[in-house]
Amino acid sequence: MTERIFDGLKVIDCASFIAGPAAATIMSDFGAEVVKIEPPGMGDPYRRRAVPNPRNPLNPGFLFDTRNKRSLALDLRTAAGRAVLYRLVKEADVFITNYPPPARGRLGITYDDLKHLNEGLIYASFTGYGETGPEANKPGFDATAWWARTGLMDLVRAGEEVNPARSLPGMGDHPSAMGTYGAIVTALYQREKTGKGNYVGSSLLANGLWANACSVQAALCGDEVRPQPPRHEALSALRVHYQCRDGRWLLLSIAADEWRWEKFKTCFDAPVLEAERFATNASRDKHARELVTILDKLFAEHDLAHWRKKLDEVGLIFGVVGRVDDIRHDEQVLAAGFLKPYADDPQLWTIDSPFFLAGQEKVPPRRAPGVGQNSDEVLREYGYSDEEIAALRADGVVA
């Protein structure tokens, strides 16, 4: 059997939706035993966030963020439910929650509630807006705290006259989960040195500021930061997206070196590109609007496949503007192992966590459990008898 870095590590995912649970998902990929605590009945509200795929009983987002976990449906509003959780906490290595601070107090799951149970516990807190300040108790989603609040929503649009766009589902949550994961792993390293657990945390607002750091830092330095200009007003025609004959787009990202321009010109049979006004980088930028118009016509002459071949042959940097339906057939994505089949449903694939450790084989992904699917199994592992489990069920504490 493959020995994994987190084999035997016990993680309690007492969180909802995405950013907190996704950090536990990453840990599960490397062998951690993750128990997801959910309210009896409908479970994590994330289960109802999207319309389920007809071939799957769970919606795609929940399927992804809850792989490899076991579900314990536990009513933390009851003293008996909290007693069950506390027994798990005594043996846990990591406890993750993103419940708003007031809810943590009502449910008895604050750091102060748990730290005396287990001095080695890593308590990972995730919030919308941080742990202190006037909005510390304010709930937030990635669309509101990560995307809108941090300037990203304002800046990622084609000119100030264009309305800001909404973010995609989970677009800020999944990068934010990496911040939470990093905090947990740092605390685990500290525990190796000190033997003591710790309280660690991250937030959507902090991660959004980190994602937008280039623009935020520029503003902090006194620069005026404005949205990207419309493509036809680009400062450089070689860092713009162009539409090909088949309707597909590609994005050029070609540096200002003159030798790159010489290589770029060889991709076209276009004498106009030899004009004096395009001879230097400075003059090309001066005439950027005209050059964009010329390149619009040239790229429209052939399909994307043609331009991919041409630009690759001369070694220039560009990117295909991908569509999500392309991903499952993307040769590079598949060859690099960025997609994995579910071990218990090989016809269904998922996205791998975005890093590797040499010599470490990740856990083959397993589908997300149903609400409370593993309640009895987990309770038996923590010493509960069948009679005690039956009593907890009868009282509605466990489901």
Image (tube, rainbow, N blue to C red):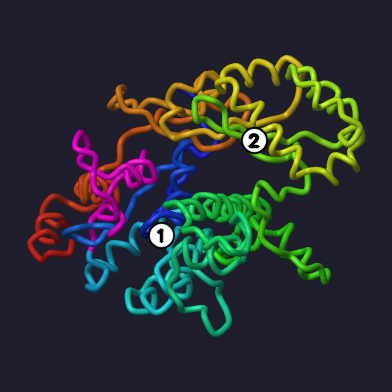
Compared across the picture, whether 293 is left or right of 103 comes to right
The residue shown at (56%, 50%) is 178
Q: Residue at x 64, y 35 (%)?
A: 251
Q: Distance between the Cα atoms at labels 1 and 2? A: 53 Å
Tell me the magenta residue range: 45-74
Q: Secondary structure at mark 2?
A: strand
Q: Residue 41: where, in percent of width, then height?
A: 16, 59
Residue 206's x, y, as percent? Answer: 61, 65
In this rendering, position of residue 266 left or right of residue 43: right
| Residue tagged 2 | 251
Task: Kindly identify which numbered label has been placed on residue 203.
Answer: none
**Viewport quadrant of the C terminus:** bottom left
Q: Earlier in the sequence, mark 1 or mark 2?
A: 1
Residue at figure coordinates x 89%, y 36% from the top left: 277
For residue 90, the mark is 1
Residue in the foreground of this view, choosing between 212 and 196: 212
Q: Where residue 328 sits in the image (x, y, percent)?
A: 42, 25
Q: Amino acid at mark 2?
A: Leu
